[in-house]
């Protein structure tokens, strides 16, 4: 009987861990030179993230725009630094991660804007369908 309770407890713990890994993550730096359509599908409640390289001291930044925020919303945005413990100047390169969550069914577009020293350099348009 105790063994069954332990098994059930472990099963619930494992299921809670699985839900945190349900986020799809795409590095758009790898997609910039491809001529393919950038379409993605997620389910309502699921998350999808797009990452791109940034470097604040050089002037490389990124921003986003959602065409329909009733279908998809920004859940989180953060920079993951290459050298998080670097104490000198110029060590602030890393990846900007935009995490979006599906709110309702439909299709929308997410535009990731690559910015260099305050000027828009490139737009990467990603179509996301929420099922």
Image (tube, grey):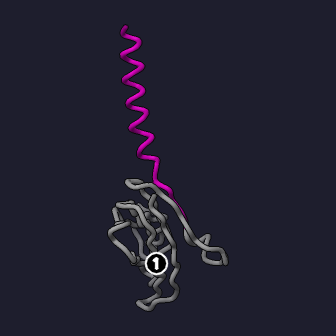
16 part of magenta stretch? yes
- Is the residue 75 above or below the residue 88 in the image? above
Q: Residue 115: image x %, image y %? A: 46, 85
Give the residue at x 37% y 74%: 68
**Predominant SS along the magenta part:** helix
Q: Secondary structure at mark 1?
A: strand
Is residue 22 among what the camera can see?
yes
The residue carrying mark 1 is 111
Q: Is residue 86 visible?
A: no
| Mark 1 surroundings within 10 Å by alpha-carbon count, few (fewer than 14), some (14 through 19), many (20 or more) | some
Quadrant assignment, res 100: bottom left
In this image, 29 relative to 115: left or right?
A: right
**Residue 89, position in %: x, y?**
42, 76
Taking the view exactly as shown, the residue that stands out farthest to the top is: 1
Residue displayed at 61% across by 72% down: 31
Horizontal side of 122 relative to 108 (left or right) equals right
Give residue 109's position: percent from left, percent from top. Answer: 46, 74
Asked if 63 appears above or below 12 in the picture, the reply is below
Q: Quadrant of the N terminus?
A: top left
Could you tell me residue 106's position as x and y percent? 43, 66
Indicate yes or no whether the magenta region holds residue 114. Answer: no
Look at the image and give the residue range highlighted in magenta: 1-27
């Amino acid at each position: 009987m105790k063994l069954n309770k332990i098994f059930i407890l472990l099963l619930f713990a494992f299921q809670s861990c699985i839900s945190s890994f349900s986020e799809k993550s795409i590095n758009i730096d790898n997609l910039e030179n491809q001529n393919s359509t950038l379409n993605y599908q997620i389910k309502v409640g699921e998350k999808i993230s797009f990452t791109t390289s940034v470097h604040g001291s050089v002037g490389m930044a990124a921003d986003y725009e959602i065409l329909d925020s009733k279908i998809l919303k920004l859940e989180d945005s953060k920079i993951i630094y290459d050298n998080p413990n670097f104490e000198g100047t110029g060590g602030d390169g890393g990846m900007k991660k935009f995490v979006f969550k599906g709110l309702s069914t439909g299709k929308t577009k997410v535009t990731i804007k690559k910015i260099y020293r305050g000027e828009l350099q490139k737009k990467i348009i990603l179509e996301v369908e929420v099922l």
